[in-house]
Amino acid sequence: MVIVFSFLSCEKENTNIQTIPYTHVYTKVSTITHSILGHGGAGTAYIDKDSFGRKIGYRGHGIFVTKIDNDTFYAFDATCTNHNTDYDHTLTFNNELGLKCPDCEIIYNPISGEATNSKNNTPPLQPYRCYNTGNGSIIIQNIRN
Ligand SMILES: [Zn+2]
């Protein structure tokens, strides 16, 4: 029941959009390794590798995961959507204020994935589905497989 509920809460916000080329994502993340995503934690973590050490996300750019509570997670590819995606433009933390592209200085909201300071309708970040397994890990995967 807990898993079903968290599944729905993620899907409610993340529509089936594709803003960068499709990349297969299915990653289990330990909330012991990434404690901000674990019990009692809240905030945003940058995850660049899966448990086998393989890089994740489009072109291995990594994925940002934001935890609101145990049933509410948001995950976005770290690829800036304001460029030609044939090149590497990877977001970084902008203090507590969002996710920032060091190349174009667009800042994205880590919950909605929307660009907050764009003047040219920059598409939102690529969302992924994410949910809590209840066993000390979360799953990040494509919304559409
Ligand atoms: Zn950019």
Image (spheres, grey):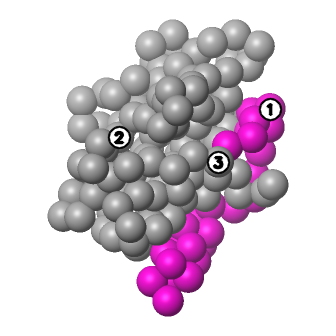
- Mark 1 lies on a secondary structure that is loop
- Mark 2 lies on a secondary structure that is strand
- Label count reads 3
Cα separation, mark 3 vs mark 1, equals 16 Å
Is 18 or 130 nearer to us in this picture?
Answer: 130
Name the residue tied to disc 1: 21
Asked whether the viewer can see residue 118, the reply is no
Residue at image position (44%, 35%) is 47
Q: Which residues are magenta?
A: 1-25
Cα separation, mark 2 vs mark 1, equals 23 Å
The part of the image, by quadrant, that contains residue 76 is: top right
Asked whether the viewer can see residue 2, the reply is yes
Q: Quadrant of the C terminus?
A: bottom right
Residue 106: which disc? none
Q: Was residue 11 drawn as part of the magenta stretch in this picture?
A: yes
Residue 45: which disc? 2
Horizontally, is 59 left or right of 99 in the view? right
Name the residue tied to disc 3: 26
